[in-house]
Amino acid sequence: MDEQLESPWIVIPARGGSTGVPRKNVRLLAGEPLIARTIKTALQGTLPGRVVVITDDDEIAEISERFGAVVLREEKTTGKATLDQVMFRTIPFLTELGANNSDVLLTMQPTCPFIKPARVKDAMQRFAQGAGSVITVVDDRHLGWVFDAEGNPKPDYAARVNRQELPAKFKESGAIIGARISDIVRTGTRIVEPINLVEVPEAEALDIDTFSDWAVAEHLASRKRILLRTDAAKELGMGHVYRTLALAYSLARHQITIVLSDDKPLGAEFFAEYPFEVATVVSDLEFLSFARKSKADLVVLDRLDNLAEFVTLLGGFCKVVTFEDLGDGAEVADLVIADMYEHPRVPAERQLTGVENAILAPSFESLKRHITFHETVEEVLVLFGGTDPSNLAVTALRALEYIEFPGRVTLVRGLGADLVDPKAYKLKLRVLSNVKNMPAVMEDADIALSSAGRTITELSSLGIPTICMAQNAKELTHTHTTPTNGVIMLGLGALVSTETLAAHLKELITNEDLRFKLHTRALEATGTRSNDRIVRRILKQIGF
């Protein structure tokens, strides 16, 4: 407590006879008894010896003493006494412990485990300013109905508007109610004018009464603070931000912030369309400070070649997971995800490798899509990443022109890729930009042309035979561009001529047996992969 504020007496009533959730007050929540959370919060808000648990239960009494509370034993009751009555008859015991009439008595419920110590300070500040009572409340405005004198339903609102436009309406959270001891003795109640309301967020207002409430409590108690560090740029491509977005959706029940470089605005432009908190930093040093101030539990680095010193500093206060990282930072990270290439100096027990650990856009899992193999190739899909720095799409279109492909051609361009004029080619060509639902576009394709990024696994998951050309030398190291995954790899795209690509295209289009083998192998390779399974694997391996 602040030296300028009084130290209250905090009483925690805890019966042993809970029926909605049996043994509720001693049931383990995130590894400790429920009542322990409220005791620990109360002890941060007052002096030692001023936190009192009133109980009729031996187990509750033992646990409360172990966690530092004074225990007042009562006989088992029917539970029909009001808390005002319980507090009134508890005051003589508090007086024996040294309480004065001018002291503040706060009641805190063990069934409100997420109230923060700062709320005790908020309450005491209100008393210092002249409050007679302080009650924690939560905003509970809704379109509601009541019954009139004749028993007919009628609205309790003046106009049907959005919830946010309704007049404020507050519900007691039950977390904290308090008054001065003298006022409770005088009035027999803790509700004394002038009344002050302390509004708390919905999570802090949770009052556990049923197993549904308990499920919410388990969710809140197990949430982590996670930072996802990534970037996008012409030279980097868009693969990192696409994977980070998919990861954010899979981790969305946690508190997520996506952190980008201030000098790479393409990432911020991309994430502006999605419902995640985004922050920018100018350097790794600033990110370290941001992560520490954020009290991050986990940092995920989806960028290339992290330095060991940087990862070591992060690992001093949180877990660190890196994706596709060949830097020496991967050697000191808690876990490396390397679905496209293994890190040669990271032990196998700290790596998750192969396409079964590839994170894909959630849209690839929303529907169980019916994959149809066609005897003839009617549509070719061309997609070379979000930026296509080597302009391989042009090579692909020229090769399709060269073989005079008569079918449909779909070209997908990302935010950072150069525009392509469909009228410039003698093809049945359509150009799509910044596609949001990629599997809906992909599933119509009979074959595809792509670079060696994460798109390869997306195509494999739909059984689409693919000709691959690498954008750069680093992509040549990717291990997922193999026939086992339905892929024909031609090497570095800048060295592949139009004629060479045309020959491979013609062979794949006309050789039905080859296409069918690639189709079936791709589906077999990706058949058990899922984002949720991968995320569970990651969290389990780092001990969450």
Image (tube, helix red, strand yellow):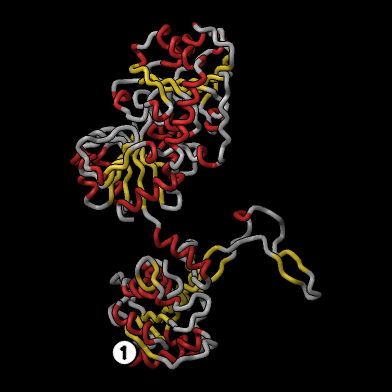
Q: Residue at x 36, y 30 (%)?
A: 480
The x, y position of residue 410, in whole percent, is: 55, 20
Q: Residue at x 36, y 78 (%)?
A: 8
Residue 355 seen by the camera: yes
The x, y position of residue 237, in whole percent, is: 38, 26
The x, y position of residue 325, in whole percent, is: 28, 35
Q: Is residue 158 above or below residue 14?
A: above
Q: Is residue 486 left or right of residue 146?
A: left
Q: Nearer the viewer, residue 187 or 429?
A: 429
Quadrant in the rendering for residue 95: bottom left
Q: Is residue 161 left or right of residue 436?
A: right
Q: Is residue 443 left or right of residue 246?
A: right
Q: Residue at x 26, y 39 (%)?
A: 284
Residue 109 seen by the camera: no
Q: Nearer the viewer, residue 424 or 9?
A: 424
Instruction: State which quarter of the image contains the N terminus.
Output: bottom left
**Direction front: furthest residue:** 513
Quadrant in the rendering for residue 473: top left
Q: Nearer the viewer, residue 34 or 411?
A: 411
Q: Is residue 154 left or right of residue 68?
A: right
Residue under circle 1? Answer: 97
Badge 1 amino acid: Leu
Q: Using a 10 Å C-alpha cutoff, classify the residue at mark 1 as few (fewer than 14 neighbours), some (14 to 19) or many (20 or more).
A: few
Q: Is residue 277 above or below residue 166?
A: above
Instruction: State which quarter of the image contains the C terminus.
Output: bottom left
The x, y position of residue 412, in whole percent, is: 51, 23
Secondary structure beneath disc 1? Answer: helix
Q: How many marks?
A: 1
